[in-house]
Amino acid sequence: MILDLLIKDFKEQNEVNKKRRIIKIISSLLLCALFIALETFIFISVNKKIEVFSKGSNYGFLVLFLLLVALLAIFSSLNKAYRFLFNEKDILLLSYRPLVKDDLIIAKFLMIYLSETATLFLFSFPLFISYGINNIYIASYYVLSALYPFFASLITSALTFILLIPYKYFIDYLKKHYLLQILISAAIVIVLCYLYQFVLNLFLNIINNSKLDYLFNQDFIVFLDSLSKYAFPLSSLLDVFIKQDNLLSSLAIYLGMTMILLALAFILIETFYHLYLTDSKEKKKKQIINKVKKDSIFVSLIKKELILVFRGSNDLSSYVSLLIMQPFFTYVVISSLTSLLYVNMEMLLTYYPELINALNITLILLFSSVIASQSMYALKREGKGLIVSKTIPISPIYQCLIKILIPSCISSLSLIISLIILISSSNISLNVFFVSLFLGLVFIISLNLIGLYDNIRILKSRNPSSKSSLSSIYGLALPLILAFIHFALTFLKIKAWEIYLIESALFSALLITLIIFFKRIVLRGYLDIGGELL
Amino acid sequence: MENKAIEIINLHKSYGNKEVLKGISLSVDKGEIFGLLGKNGAGKSTLIDCMIGLKRFNEGQILIDNLDIKTKPLEVKNNFGYVPSEPLTYEIMSGKEYLEFIASCYQMSQEAFESNFNFLKNKFELADEDLLRPIKEYSHGMKQKICLMASLIHNPSLWVLDEPTVGLDIIVYETLVKMMKSYVQNKNTIFVTSHNIDLVAEICDRVAIINDGKIDLLIDLNKEPFKRKNLKTIFFKVYGEKL
């Protein structure tokens, strides 16, 4: 029975569409390969530098990396475990079957265990190989280290299960508090941006063969040495696989600790899961409706859009992420590119200073297109409610305008923040600020209009797996065409303000054309959308 | 013409090359309950979709309260309430939020909304704590109740129901029947399609049977009351089947 449940969960994880499954597998493999390459490169390079600084600290550095990988496995599995155990559809389907509850929990645990083993194998095994080559270990070390993920994931899976209960309470609480969701998403994105910057700096320093003095001071080395001693129970396992001393006692300590944690995890989850299954249906708070309130048409449509965009989906966190990430990445990319170009192409930029502005405006527009891409699903987000929207006495044009208002405002806000950061850090001039602002706003509105057309086209085609291709092409092509025009006019020695004027005129003409077609597109397309397939 | 709630003239509708409605003409008087019967795929739902402006049609004219659905769609939409064959709402909203949204779309007065909300809430026996929960957590019957409430909240003069009894328990079913009967007392009109011939026979004043995209038979059950009992047999006869 456990095996059947495991196979069911495994099948549910897989994409049904064969083409999409292949694309997903290939892209995941490519991403993993890139991550492993970067991880091993940084590990080997930093290890060499540590060796120069303190000969015995490599082991501590490996422990640090393995601990980070273990933490990554635990936290990446938490959400997966949450979805596995508290999937309402799954509970509904299985609750009336003659299943032993323990079988269900064991099957879910095995699923998490296998997933964490795969994660640890992908990200730890290359570290073991690098460490082994560096320290000239014999063949048995490599064979043995391949077993490390199977042992280590026992403890990480147990910890995932133990942490799952507070995680569930936290997520359930978070789902009801939108402000907290925004704050937490913002905090996570800021931490990720900081980490990205840290790794990028480290990577660039390694490439430039810098000394990394800011990282390797005495305190850090002491920290590394103590880490290898106190990273219990992982340290016991590493004693078995790497040091290979006190084999039996170290293994016994690790397995003993693992058994205790596994038992604790099972007792906690079993008790909690039982309470969850029996109470979830019965627990109903007595609530009273004090007042019902009607709003104006505008307010009610805006409210509806906010509910569709932000409630019960990942859109809230992705919007917050993009809002923070666009300014950050625009700043990081533009500032590093500017300094790089000034160093390497000084002569060309002296003659053609507009080239750098062209590049900056293009990058600003490209980043804007990324955040605006969220709006491509404006109509699809309606789901079955699309039929409702067709029966209410409000013009489809007005409804569609409201639909693109919210994503346009969010994208514009992100653009304005990016530009303020760029101008306050002197990365762009005042002229470029205003031109980018105008072109950016026009670009965002036009992109949203095309996104809406794309949405109508896809919904009309009755193929729910269709992707919004036209808007993606437009979002990428227009900034590149603009860059080409800007470069060409610069080389033709046209004055900067004239170039800006030509570009603004072109963008305005494009927007006016789209607005003229908008009414026709919406009126003709809206009635043809059935909504049956949504 | 003044007395007509619905006037359909020579309606044609095709999906690609397949003609689904082949020149339908019918009229529904104000204050009557009009039933449309037909087997699956006969064109009942398509006719309703064209009537309420959900779908385009190729030829013909549809007038609701003397307003053309093609030229005055928003005015027409103000006048009817629609119950789809499967409950369609914004399931991410709570029942209360959804009804507030619908009331706002029809620009009802606050007083009328409050009074209708309380009346319908009690009629369909939806508790406050249920109305505060997201609709996606509702059972099928509760979703159908919310759709029924939303269709009546703005006091429409025409109530269009497409298979309204699917998934309703016997108590709600009886409530619905009573509501339909009292609804037409005030010169309001009902257009209902259903597979439930007993329901149609019980409440309808006139019945049309649609077959292969055309109205095959039109019966005035008030003038021919004996046909109420035999409606099932008549229905089968239209389709060349024996009961």
Image: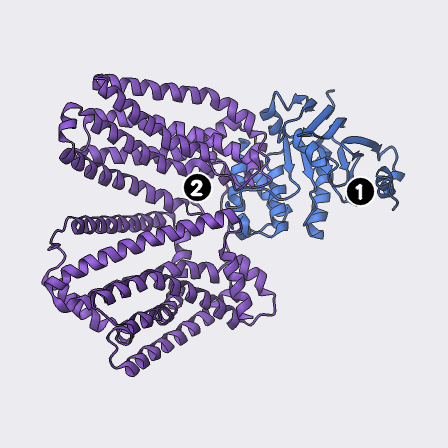
Chain to which the residue tagged by mark 2 belongs:
A
At horizontal 41% and vertical 60% (from top left) the residue drawn is A168
Note whether residue A167 is visible. Answer: yes
Say which of B134 and B60 sits in front. B60
At horizontal 20% and vertical 73% (from top left) the residue drawn is A229
Amino acid at pointer 1: Glu
Residue A88 at x, y = what percent? 52, 58
Q: Is A274 displayed left or right of B168 in the figure? A: left
Amino acid at pointer 2: Val
Badge 1 marks a residue whose secondary structure is helix
Residue A193 at x, y = what percent? 26, 48
Q: Which residue is mark 2?
A: A309
Q: Is A193 displayed left or right of A109 in the figure? A: left
Q: Which residue is mark 1?
A: B202
The Cα–Cα distance between marks 1 and 2, rounded to whole angstroms, is 45 Å
The quadrant holding residue A464 is top right
Colour-to-chain, blue:
B
